[in-house]
Amino acid sequence: MLTLAKPDNRVIKILGRNGVDPSREYMLSSYVYCYSEPGRHLIKSTMTGGIYSLSDEEWANIDPAVNPVVSGKVFEASGLSELVSSCVFVYTTDDDYSRYKLAVSVLKAMDKKTGIKSYTILPTTGCNARCVYCYEKGMKISSMTEATADKVVEYILRTKSSEEITLRWFGGEPLVANKIITRICTALNEHNVLFKSKIITNASLFTPELLDTAVNIWHLNGAQVSVDGSKADYEARKLFCTPVEHNYEHLLKTIGLMLEAGLEVTLRCNYDHGNVEGMYEFWEDINKLYGDTDKLRLYSSMLFQAQKDESCVDLHRRYIEIRSEAQKNGMKFLRGKSSEYRMKSNFCMADSEGKCVVISPEGDLYNCEHLPTNTACSNIFDEDFKLKSDPRASLEVAEECRNCCFLPECTPFCRNGCPDWFKYCREIKSIDTEYQLKNLI
């Protein structure tokens, strides 16, 4: 047996068992995904992040389709005891859901730091693009005043964590209100606040001068840029107010400027049935220009509108086929960055127990950027308000989700009102996990 990805030792210490008890019987944990090819069998624990590769002979000892219950003696005799100590197999008497809750509660208890670590700030809901799929369509357009920006600084000073904090600029298009961003960051610098910035942007308004301000005053170190595939798809979907000035060629040039400024650039490709076939052409353009940089990565996200019916599963499968073909042809940046897995005690802002918050242009506070505008939990002017998780995060996980193998990688109140939830999430996650495991092979 080979260990392809090491498990999170914190979870092992909470849930793992020292050695195998030959007198006990074991079963595969609910939070495991298995993938097999001829001669190779992979097991991924979504609880610990551990990934293991087994031969045909080893797999025959524990194949859950043949042996739903495995004696401890079998693990000892076959040299597979690590599958027990690493939580891949559990006692037949175990309640996996209770073990999951225990791990989450202990991890949360281990984080004793107080104060807000991350502020998502919307300096404006205005935008210089008219994306045809924008989920903010119809939202009231407003921009933060200088007076409110000064109050935001006061709010950060009295609520921030003692460690370095992160400012995440969101919108609308936050660069439309870049002077407000500069005002807030300048004030924080004057107060010697240790912070870094990230931005979600279409990048069209970045200039060399503004990038210099962003790096030196905003402490900007990362930018997520929303794109839409090929030149034809990008320009048909973005619909910039000034298309002669802001277009596909301008995007490619600006990506280069951001990389030269030292930013970590992430391209988020929004896709649906209408533009998925153009993704390869876009990746090809990016690879020719920037394929050698280690500061560029790419990921894709299905548009909310495309998630509404079961055709989204075939759509995502087609996207993965195109991505796989691009990888085979040497597009290195598509692989992303590997990092040591650490189980999160929360997978969303709204379940952060007061560690992150969203601030609107009016100074209203939200647990999540995707929550409706009428669900503010307070505002920056209320000095007595103590930020907590969204109340729905404390509810029990929906019955139909408790034994889903992807629960440890999901928000616990998914079916209790999370606006990002969609009916075919399990099928999509299965496709993604299988793609990950195939890449390891």
Image: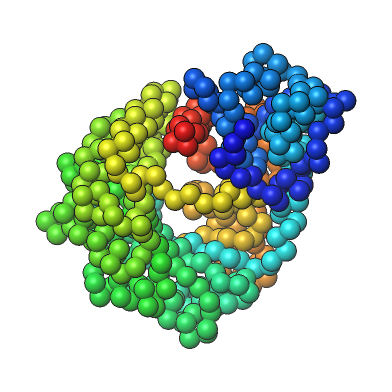
**Does 37 appear above or below 202?**
above
Asked which quadrant contains residue 124, the reply is bottom left
Give whichever of 140, 355 is nearer the camera.
Answer: 355
Give whichever of 184, 15 is nearer the camera.
Answer: 15
Does 31 sit left or right of 138 as displayed? right
Instruction: Measuring from the top left, give residue 165's x and y in whole percent.
Output: 54, 69
Instruction: Measuring from the top left, give residue 15's x and y in whole percent.
Output: 76, 42
**Does 123 appear above or below 291?**
below
Q: Which residue occupies 48% across, 49% down?
A: 338
Instruction: Measuring from the top left, give residue 441's x and y in whole percent.
Output: 47, 33
Q: Which residue occupies 42% across, 26% down?
A: 313
Q: Which residue occupies 76% across, 26% down?
A: 77
Instruction: Measuring from the top left, give residue 74's x and y in whole percent.
Output: 76, 23
**Does 314 appear above or below 205?**
above
Does 355 sit left or right of 71 as displayed? left
**Does 401 appear above or below 178?**
above
Which image quarter is the N terminus in?
Answer: top right
Q: Residue furthest left?
A: 244
- Residue 176 can be seen in this image: no
- Residue 111 can be seen in this image: yes
Q: Which residue occupies 70% across, 60% down?
A: 111
Q: Residue furthest right?
A: 23
Q: Residue furthest bottom?
A: 190
Q: Residue furthest top?
A: 66
Asked which quadrant contains residue 324, the reply is top left
